[in-house]
Amino acid sequence: MSNRQAEIAAALDVVPPFTDTAALVAQIDKRKAFIKQCLRNSGLKVLVLGISGGVDSLTAGRLAQLTVEELRAETGDSGYRFIAVRLPHGTQHDEQDAQDSLKFIRADEEDTVNIEDSVRGLGEQVSHLQQLSDARRDFVTGNIKARIRMVAQFAIANANNGLVIGTDHAAEAVMGFFTKFGDGACDLAPLSGLVKGQVRAIAKHLGAPENLVFKVPTADLEELRPGKPDEEAHGVSYAEIDAFLHGQPVSEHAYATIVRTYDNTRHKRELPLVP
Ligand SMILES: Nc1ncnc2c1ncn2[C@@H]1O[C@H](COP(=O)(O)OP(=O)(O)OC[C@H]2O[C@@H]([n+]3cccc(C(=O)O)c3)[C@H](O)[C@@H]2O)[C@@H](O)[C@H]1O
Ligand SMILES: Nc1ncnc2c1ncn2[C@@H]1O[C@H](COP(=O)(O)OP(=O)(O)OP(=O)(O)O)[C@@H](O)[C@H]1O
Ligand SMILES: [Mg+2]
């Protein structure tokens, strides 16, 4: 393992590969205990998370639901609950996957906020957007979508005295593959430190349908390329990112791409610059 691999894995607190089922189950238990601790420390009882149809929110959502069920059983307090939120931009091309995710998660409450009008309304007021090429405007608007989803989730959390869950994990964190203060903004990030394959393994262990567990990851923010695979944007596969984070050999191209992207996105993993 090279020094940069070790350094980056340590900085992201990467969980070593699961050697057996016991190691996987220990991580599930650890993350449920973490969610419980966050609720206890905050004095709040409600969790909020957007459900996209992707495996990250599928996994975090099911963990959240299982955790509040355990808390209700342990405390006898029916106030503990999880609100799963659909946040489509108009009609989502993979809405069926999102509905199947909700069916698997079995959240205490489901809510839907269509972000399309808000995204359009804001976009129309930002004159700088109009000067951009179609491709650049589409990219910037994608980040507006992620940030409006953040606003909606915090509004629901505010209204219910709840906490917003984020789905960031090590394979996204290393690539800075999230919108700063958009989907990157949350109160707790229970998947933190896991690589993508481990998120999938947890989802599979929890009994999620295979088509959702192994679904091609997509930020799905660009109108010009609905469902564009994350791996196209990364220029490397999640298998390579996971291998890098686990200190395994990767191609020279993957190594250089991951290290360069990690260094360029450092600001996204840190607090705002201060004097
Ligand atoms: N050196 C620096 N020090 C401090 N701040 C710096 C900075 N460089 C840029 N910035 C700031 O950061 C901004 C750029 O960051 P940001 O706004 O995040 O924008 P950016 O990193 O350019 O784009 C977000 C990327 O994340 C992907 N994404 C977003 C959301 C969800 C998912 C997903 O997987 O679901 C993926 C998206 O497809 C895109 O590739 C700049 O406009 C500037 O405000
Ligand atoms: N259309 C959507 N509806 C609800 N929530 C969304 C939507 N798109 C994104 N989100 C929220 O933003 C988070 C970040 O998106 P991201 O694509 O990284 O995760 P994912 O869709 O759950 O899994 P994957 O990365 O495998 O596609 C999601 O986990 C979810 O909480
Ligand atoms: Mg997604």
Image: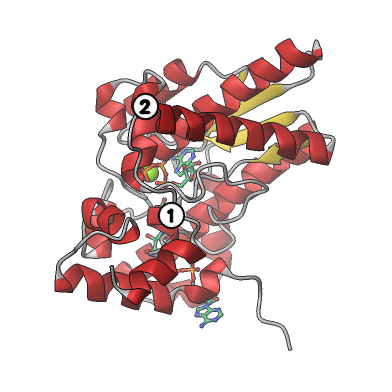
- Which is more toward the observer, 169 or 94? 169
Left or right: 76 in relation to 246: right
Residue 72 location in percent, x, y? Answer: 73, 14
Depicted 152 relative to depicted 268: above or below: above
Binning the other alpha carbons within 10 Å of mark 1 as few (below 14), some (14 to 19) or many (20 upward) gives many
Residue 54 location in percent, x, y? Answer: 37, 37
Q: Quadrant of the C terminus?
A: bottom right
Helix, strand or loop under label 1: helix
Residue 91 shows in this picture: no
- Quadrant of residue 185 in the image? bottom right
Amino acid on which the number 2 mark rests in the picture: Thr
Residue shown at the point (34%, 55%) measured from the top left: 222
Amino acid on which the number 1 mark rests in the picture: Ala
Q: Are marks 2 and 1 in contact (CB under 8 Å)?
A: no
Helix, strand or loop under label 2: helix
Residue 41 shows in this picture: yes
How many labels, in total?
Answer: 2
Residue shown at the point (50%, 43%) measured from the top left: 191
Q: Which residue is mark 1?
A: 170
Residue 210 location in percent, x, y? Answer: 26, 24
Left or right: 39 in relation to 191: right
Residue shown at the point (42%, 39%) measured from the top left: 56
- Quadrant of residue 113 in the image? top right
- Quadrant of residue 137 in the image? bottom left
Residue 135 location in percent, x, y? Answer: 30, 68
Depicted 128 relative to depicted 214: above or below: below
Farthest residue to the bottom: give it.
Answer: 275
Q: Which mark is residue 21?
A: 2
